[in-house]
Amino acid sequence: MARIAVIGAGMGALTAAARLAVAGHRVAVYERTDTYGGALRRFERDGFSFDTGPALLPLPAVYRDLFVKTGKEPLESCVELVQVDPSSRHVFADGTEVSLPNASRAGVVAALDDGLGADAGKRWGDFLVRAREAWDRTRRPLLEEPLWPDWQVLAEREPYPSVPHKRLLRTRRAGTLAEIGAWELRDPRLAALLESHALGYGLDPRIAPASAAVLPYMEHAFGTWYVRGGLRELARAVYDRCLARRVEFRFGAEVTGVLEKDGRASGVELADGSAAEADFVVAGVAPGTLARLTAGTVVRGEGEVPSQPAAAARLTVLLALRGSRPEGTAHRTVVHTPDREAELEALFGTAPGNRRPTVTVLRPDDPRPAPADHEAVTLTTAVPARPGRPHGELVDDMITAAERAVPGLRDRLLWHEARTPADNADETGAEDGAVPVPALAAAGGRLLHPSNSTRLPGLFTVGGWAHPGGGLPHAGMSGALVAGLIVEGPEFRGSQ
């Protein structure tokens, strides 16, 4: 039985802790804040409650596997999972609207044909077939296996099978999401639908590799799920599973350094001056924090995937509305920007932050987040991960955009609360509140993440800033990979 110190209580760290504990190890988690869950936090006021991080769960099989492997109670015995249908409603700049059914290719094709015109559904359906091929080619190395030592192979090969496109006497193939939208989808509304998946992770579709097609494919193939009571309930369930496996938690315990002895990690040093010895250390922290904790030690070396900063953060606006949620309201509505270029330049260029943003409106069919005859609504948009950015005017822009999805919104508004990137930075430790992106192939490796093992023996990294990157499924898989590397050693090759 090894002693294992886990730094941080984010979802990747919690999944690693549960799996290591069930393997017979003595696990202690040190979290600098007063609670668990990382970005899966909850804001409560006047009887309203809101998720302040991710609010929907793709690929729930990752967490089903966790619960199967760590105890007798399956995930569905610990939380109530509901498949969201429609998966999403889209309000486009030209006023057209379309609602897409959950996990139904035929249904999506029919809805797009009805909403956007004949042949729109076929073009999107054909795109999903190609996206599936990219998924099949990258699923194992980017989600289920430790990062390959020859990761450059993933960096150089574009797995998305683009359609040849004749352009100025040359045959071209789409290498970015924007080119897929322009050359293969050939409709600005379908392009906006595609690019909204990239923007949700802070990716610039103009340079995001075509392999990012796997993001909408995951949602299409595995569905979109909601946890009754909010996604914070998933964090609570995983935390409870850790407690049941006798994981020890110390909240308000800030780790200030990783201890070394005889050339390997040997424990952690805490802000109160105490130290905790360990045979392994698992760090679920952002790259800048890891660098401070290991000052003077080479953790990453030449030839390894460098730590990549996220391109964007999230601004979240919580709305308390009088009046009940109307029957038949879509859980998620995406209101697309009327000025794509201005939005992208504001996000990824040097333009001022005021813009008419793409806004996601979340209205769960769940009585728990609001008092009777009231509704809790959450708005999110991507913003630059830069310090000192004012967000006051953008909050009002988001509410204005949301009125296209929620008629009479301002007349129903009791109060609103903005959650900025600075709040995310305080809660997660991510510099400027940046959001890590999922690992993606191609693009020269700039969207891969550092391996879970490090050059300091006994030190491993977990969570969104390590392989396989950001997103709830990816965080859960990072915990599985770290547990496998510790239990089975370097020969571990991932789930079968």
Image (cartoon, helix red, strand yellow):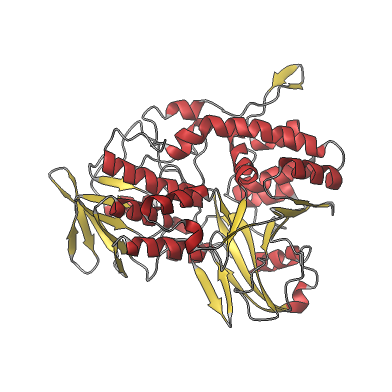
Residue nearer the viewer, 135 or 285: 135
Residue 223 in the image: x percent, y percent? 62, 49
Is there any visible trace of residue 413 in the rendered image?
Answer: yes
Q: Can you give x and y, in whole percent of width and height, for residue 228 in the image? A: 57, 66
Residue at the far left in the pictured view: 262
Residue closest to the eye, 15 or 257: 15
Is 112 situated left or right of 379 in this image? right
Q: Position of residue 196 (x, y in %)?
A: 67, 48
Horizontal side of 321 relative to 7 (left or right) equals right
Q: Position of residue 28 (x, y in %)?
A: 26, 60
Q: Which residue sits furthest bottom?
A: 46
Quadrant where the C terminus sits is: top left
How many marks on residues?
Answer: 0
Q: Residue furthest front?
A: 72
Q: Residue at x 46, y 25 (%)?
A: 153
Give left or right: position of 12 versus 455: right
Q: Is residue 281 above or below residue 105?
A: below
Q: Nearer the viewer, residue 31 or 82?
A: 82
Q: Is residue 6 above or below residue 316?
A: above
Decide if residue 204 is in sight here: no
Residue drawn at 67 percent across, 46 percent down: 103
**Residue 445 falls left or right of residue 277:** right
